[in-house]
Image (cartoon, rainbow, N blue to C red):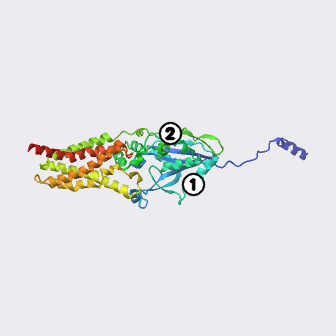
Amino acid sequence: MKKWTAFFLLYPFLFLPLPAETTSPEPGGSLTIQLAVIGPGDALYLKWGHIGMIVRDERTGEGRFYDYGLFSFETENFYRNFAMGRLIYSVGVSPVEWNLSRAAEAGREIHLMDLNLSPRTRLEIKNFLENNIRRENRNYLYHHYDNNCATKIRDILDTATGGQLRAFTDKPAALTLRDHTVRHLQEAPLFGVILPFAMGPVIDEPITVWDELFLPSTFLTALEDFRYTDETGRERKLVSRIRPYHAAPGRPPVPEEATPFWPWTLAWGILAALVLGTGLKFSYRKPGRIILGLGNLGLGLMLGIPGTLLFFMSFFTDHDVTYGNMNLLFINPLMLLLLPLGIAALGSSAKKPAPALLGLRITWTIGTAGAVVSLLNIVFGVTSQRNIVPLCFFLPPALTMSFLPLLWQKKEKKGR
């Protein structure tokens, strides 16, 4: 009886389906990869935005933010390396939400780009990043246009797509590197003049969309329509979704095209010319010599110091963007002569102002000749450099100091 009772109790379970054979999940199948595109910040080095790569593991719930834009002012020899063009950056990893919340609190716009990659490729990218953050691999030589946080991620995606990203973006860009530099400095006009002044013709050469990917923001547009063929032969859209994570309504958007700075530098140049012209006209009086001397002292500082720094950067450092800079033809260490000559003009007498005036005129005439050569370079395109902004500031006072004394000397001779 007990046997039959056990049989009837177990009978229904005899017809239940056997459990399916369990299989291990595909490697990389639990991973998701995103790009975090972060807009400009307040500090100068944040004006061009930032980008990081996010890897999440749905199985463990862990999210890691890989950041190629890490540096510290406290690094040994930081300022010397910066001056010599040998700035060391590194890649590191940190929690996702901590990074995003910190950027949001700073009032920076954030977009997340979901990437459509095969599980195998996702795993390869994760392994590559994990290997990259090891102490022996994490440092790299930074270059603003060729090797930064954005180009590092660009190169990872190009490798992940078998070179198809580079092929897709190998088409002419609408703007140059100078255009991109200046348009991101519209809210910092002083640096919008100084930084492009230091950069030579290399940033005026035609570039491709691939080159534009040194800017994090260009990922949002350049990758939007990119499709590639994965290792299985399947065509994929690389970016499956772009979604806003944080808005920054209080921060002015970066303009699509830069507003030119040359009208402002021309206005300041004309003002400088009027000051020097007034000093020249009344140089036979003490107030006129004071105006002339102080004007040349100020311009000697404004032109001589940047000219000397540019000379040093162009010939003795690894700042390759400064090489071949046409601005050196007229803004160079020679402009430092305006300092002692300006002092001499201050101390000259009404009877003997000639030596100081002659020295000033010779110095400015040499600078004028260099500026004319640089202007002809723009007209005839000997090099690609577009340096109209510093020329607009330099030429009015230079022409005034070079030719105005000569014109007045001729008038005085005629009057006699």
Answer with left or right where residue 130 lies relative to residue 253.
Answer: right
The amino acid beneath tag 2 is Thr
According to the picture, the residue beneath numbered tag 1 turns out to be: 130
Task: Report x, y in % for residue 253.
Answer: 42, 39
Task: Report x, y in % for residue 252.
Answer: 40, 39
Q: Residue at x 43, y 59 (%)?
A: 75
Q: Which mark is residue 221?
A: 2
Answer with left or right where residue 363 lies relative to residue 180.
Answer: left
Quadrant of image for the N terminus: top right
> Tag count in the figure?
2
Q: Which mark is residue 8?
A: none
Say which of 60 and 367 sits in front.
Answer: 367
Task: Report x, y in % for residue 373.
Answer: 31, 47
Question: Which element type, helix, strand or loop, lies under badge 2?
Answer: helix
Say which of 306 and 8 sits in front.
Answer: 306
Q: Residues at badges 1 and 2 in contact (C-beta under 8 Å)?
A: no
Q: Residue at x 59, y 51 (%)?
A: 126
Question: Which element type, helix, strand or loop, lies under badge 1?
Answer: helix
Residue extending furthest toward the left:
416
The amino acid beneath tag 1 is Glu
Answer with left or right where residue 81 lies relative to residue 220.
Answer: left
Q: CA distance from mark 1 to mark 2?
A: 28 Å
Q: In this rendering, does residue 52 appear at all?
A: yes
Mark closest to the chain's N terminus, 1 or 2: 1
Q: Residues within 10 Å of mark 2 (few under 14, many from 20)?
A: few
Answer with left or right where residue 276 lies relative to residue 351.
Answer: right
Q: In this rendering, does residue 43 appear at all?
A: no
Task: Report x, y in % for residue 237.
Answer: 59, 39
